Image (cartoon, helix red, strand yellow):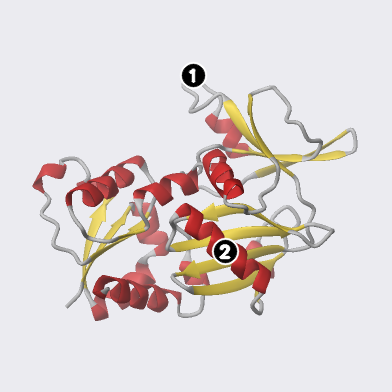
């Protein structure tokens, strides 16, 4: 029987992985590497898994993934490089733009310094915490400016995580498009932007394939090295799609039969 190693943390295990585990346990032998319990002494590990599936993005998780990559030939979905790029907004914006992917204009500015565009969203630079986008909307001099409270929290206090903000040019869009990629399979949804309706799932609907988004999604995940991903897009008034966020640890429970699709994909990859 194929052995799958699930590398995760308590949050992702309890909130996002239960259905996957129920299915995976019927088709494979699953071992769980939990960040909070296991990642202290790496010297005692004897990895005998056929494949690893990473459902978290903390520093200890990344260290374990790097160890597996260095010491074994066992495939890891996703790789440490791709996870690191995905949660660093500034770095992935650079990589994506270099690959020809259309991302909103962006800048990295010291706290208190404005970006070179009038309407913008302030986001946290490193997006690896398990808490949701929390927008504070302002209108100043007729321009819309959105501040993610996470960015404020992480840049203040006695021990700030960083002293800069990531600014992203604000794209006005009727819909937000959500694209999930599992290997070569892509799933498409749209929903009202969170700034219009914070309950994104209430307005989310499945949509037909959009060839332009398909091309962007494949190119973006290839540039990042991602095998599993979700991506957020906004569509400007002139019809251009902008990739605003890319995630290495998405919640595939939103896809019909998502846990089964993931499990089957991992089994297939383990046999390659």
Q: Quadrant of residue 113?
A: top right
Say which of 16 and 232 sits in front.
232
From the viewer's perspective, is residue 129 above or below residue 187?
above
Whole-percent x and y of residue 133?
60, 48
Q: Is residue 204 visible?
A: no
Element assignment for label 1: loop
Whole-percent x and y of residue 156?
56, 24
From the viewer's perspective, is residue 10 above or below residue 213?
above
Whole-percent x and y of residue 141?
89, 33
Residue density around tag 1, few if under 14, some if 14–19, many if 20 or more, within 10 Å: few
Mark 1 vs mark 2: give the one in front. Answer: 2
Q: Quadrant of residue 249?
A: bottom left
The residue under the point 75% across, 45% down is: 170
**Label 1, label 2: how far apart the Cα atoms are:** 40 Å
Residue 158's mark?
A: 1
The residue under the point 57% across, 42% down is: 94
Residue density around tag 2, few if under 14, some if 14–19, many if 20 or more, within 10 Å: many
Mark positioned earlier in the residue sequence (1 or 2): 1
Q: Quadrant of residue 179?
A: bottom right
User: Label 2, on which residue?
Assistant: 217
The quadrant the N terminus occupies is bottom left
Left or right: where 54 falls relative to 251: left
Say which of 68 and 137 sits in front.
68
From the viewer's perspective, is residue 19 above or below residue 198?
below
């Amino acid at each position: 029987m194929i052995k799958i190693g699930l590398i995760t943390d308590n949050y992702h295990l309890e909130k996002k992985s239960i259905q996957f585990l129920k299915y995976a346990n019927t088709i494979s032998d699953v071992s769980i590497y939990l960040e909070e319990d296991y990642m202290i002494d790496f010297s005692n590990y004897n990895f005998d898994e056929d494949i690893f599936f990473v459902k978290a993005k903390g520093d200890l998780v990344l260290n374990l993934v790097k160890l597996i990559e260095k010491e074994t030939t066992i495939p890891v979905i996703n790789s440490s490089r791709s996870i690191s790029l995905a949660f660093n907004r500034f770095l992935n914006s650079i990589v994506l733009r270099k690959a020809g992917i259309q991302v909103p204009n962006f800048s990295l500015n010291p706290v208190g310094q404005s970006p070179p565009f009038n309407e913008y969203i302030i986001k946290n630079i490193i997006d690896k915490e398990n808490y949701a986008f929390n927008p504070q909307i302002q209108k100043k001099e007729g321009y819309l400016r959105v501040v993610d409270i996470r960015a404020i929290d992480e840049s203040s206090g006695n021990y700030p995580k960083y002293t800069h903000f990531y600014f992203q040019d604000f794209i006005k869009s009727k819909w937000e498009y959500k694209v999930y990629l599992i290997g070569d399979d892509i799933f498409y949804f749209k929903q009202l932007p969170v700034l219009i309706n914070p309950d994104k799932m209430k307005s989310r609907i499945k949509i037909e394939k959009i060839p332009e988004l398909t091309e962007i999604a494949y190119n973006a995940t290839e540039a990042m090295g991602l095998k599993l991903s979700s991506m957020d897009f906004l569509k400007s008034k002139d019809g251009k799609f902008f990739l605003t966020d890319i995630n290495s640890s998405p919640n595939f429970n939103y896809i019909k039969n998502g846990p089964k699709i993931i499990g089957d994909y991992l089994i297939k990859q383990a046999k390659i």
